Image: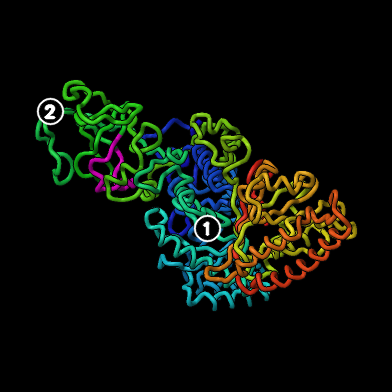
Amino acid sequence: MVVRRAAARGTGTMEGVSVTTSWQSEEPSERSAVIDLSAVWHNVVRLTQLARGRKLIAVVKADAYGHGAPEVARTALSAGADLLGTAHVSEALALRYAGITAPVLSWLHTTSTDFFDALEHNVSLGISGWELDAVLTAARETGKTATLHLKIDTGLGRNGSTAGQWPELVERVVAAQNEGLVHVEGIFTHLSVADEPARGDETMEQLNALTDAVRIARKAGLKPAMIHAANTPALLSADQLEDPDYILRDAVRIGLGIYGLSPFEDRPPKDFGLIPAMTLRTRVANVKAVPTGQGVSYGLTYRTEGPTHLALIPLGYADGVPRVATGAPVYIGGRVYPVVGRIAMDQCVIDLAQGQTVTPEGIPAGTPVVDEAVDPMVHIGDEAVLFGAGDYPSATEWADASGSINYEIVTRVSPRVPREYTSHSHLTLGDVTVSRSASALAAHSLPQDPRPTRDSSGESYTQPNWTLTRYPSSAEETQLIAQKLATHLKAGDLLMLNGELGAGKTTFTQGLGAGMGVREGIISPTFVLSRKHPNLPAGPNPGGPDLVHVDAYRLDTSADIDNIDLEDTVESSVTVVEWGTGKVEHLSESRLVIDIVRPRGAVGAPSAAFSLNYEINQSAGETEQSGAGAQGPGESSAAAEESQSLASALDALNEEWDEDEEDTDEPRTIIMRGYGPRWFERLDL
């Protein structure tokens, strides 16, 4: 079934453009941009997989890059997108008028922007600085709290607060938030060269600037839950980074990828499992035989090399076809023909003598297929496709021919060209939503899900399902994050805690303990390999699991881990292991790996303490296991008393060292990664 949205016509207008829309079922018209909504659905599903649990902001500005904003928005939301993104408030309001109630963020404003209507229709606003006063005025007069995403200019030089202006902007927003006028939901930036992976250093500079801006905001009292920077190229290239999470953050803003196009010159959409959603097509308007030397189009910049047939394609620059795209491909009946001569306002011309057959391997270089001077293979009324998916030419080929980019090729298709909507899956005409059935993907193969598989031995999951990063600015914030995590934990969970000396591992574990409701007194288990903190019946989580806190620094292998009998407690407790990488993965098929990173240049505790730990424990003869402290077989009372006395001394030393170890004034970066089926879904902290 094909559903058609006609070119705008009628009396209703917005910003000088008619918005009256008619719908009807019909066969493809004489010219149209056919939008495959199942491809949109497929692409959103694919991008959601690659985002690994981040919120996906589907960017539908510029009428969804020329694809039709209401239709694409509904489809993207049905496929799993969390929010919608537009440049202008007027675009967001058009979605509201179309009946779409999902969250929408708009970020590019002028002095004419209607912030009153924006607040009345629950449109979230990107704020760069000057708009704040106008938004606050609208909030006071409407009685609506404005939802804001603060934008920091990290190097693109367009919108956004500069680093110098940022502290003042944050201070003003905090005051407005305290007054109840605004709620800061997010902080974001735009990346400059994410589509050029070789310029990763510049992207990292922007990301570092974003991190600094977020820390300033959090320190001032703001609590944004959604930090976002990644666009389509950033998402598609994130796996090339040492830490993909540093670019993906909490949400990704995806435009081009939704429409099935690649932002990289050397990689087609299929490399990422994407399907182009738009097919620009028409019908051949004329075919005629011409002699050698026939001039074509204005300026006669092309003349035929021999007797041939010319075919007239009724699409020109008034329809959005680039005037300079001479040589761009047109597909007719299994062959591709180049545009010859200048492209005119309403039409362009192809020379049928230049046709080449399209094969599954592409267009072979070399000879024409037939002598079309005698027997043309193209006839009036044949369908002609300028670009699309599969064997059709790509929008990128048209971009190359015009010296542009594929973003522009699809976005510039004129309103004179009707949009026609189709889908491989069920289509509901009332709201144009695509069902979530697998049939939407039936015609296309989806690349392997990037989420985890076991390693070659089958013993553990080697790739994370997702990554989550938080940026606490104090020990208190670190513990609050851990307390939130604790509400998601249950008996049998394994947490691997990594970080240099002084990073805050003990602080984090104390927060876990508080959230789990276990016995207080959590300190570093550096001198006693394992401590057990039992659940408190009178605590906040009675009947919950115990917490077992382990330091595996001095243990070399998984066999050493087995010697402290963690297998006896792992199923009934939450087990937190510091320095456990490569040693404890065998304890559970699922695990949370948590890295705590302190700022570069921070000084940790003396490394000599480790040799002291080892020597003291060797002299003691054995270490405490699972916090039991019980007398072992054959151990004398004197030896037990000596061991207990030594343990007390070590505890005191440990507490003193912990005070030096943790610099609570320094901000931290906490990176969580979930592995295995237990942590298939990303945590929401």
- Residue 145 location in percent, x, y? 65, 68
- Say whether residue 402 is visible: yes
- Residue 184 location in percent, x, y? 61, 67
Q: Nearer the viewer, residue 419 or 650?
A: 650
Residue underneath mark 1? 246
Estimate the spatial distance between the alpha carbons at disc 2 and disc 1, rounded to whole Å. 61 Å
- Write the start and end of the magenta stretch as one range: 314-330
Element type where label 2 sits in the image: loop
- Horizontal relation, residue 466 to residue 26: left or right: right
Name the chief secondary structure element in magenta: loop
Q: Which residue lies at the image location 85% right of the left edge and 53% below the top edge? A: 635
Compared to residue 180, the image places residue 681 above or below, namely above
Residue lying farthest to the left in this orientation: 293
Compared to residue 165, the image places residue 19 above or below, namely above
Q: Specify few, some or many for label 1: CA neighbours under 10 Å numbering under 14, 14-19, or 20 or more.
A: many
Residue underneath mark 2? 307
- Residue 138 location in percent, x, y? 60, 71
Q: Which of the two labelled residues, at mark 2 and mark 1, occupies the earlier sequence position?
A: 1
The quadrant where residue 282 appears: top left
| Identity, as a three-letter code, of the amino acid under mark 1 | Tyr
- Horizontal relation, residue 131 to residue 675: left or right: left
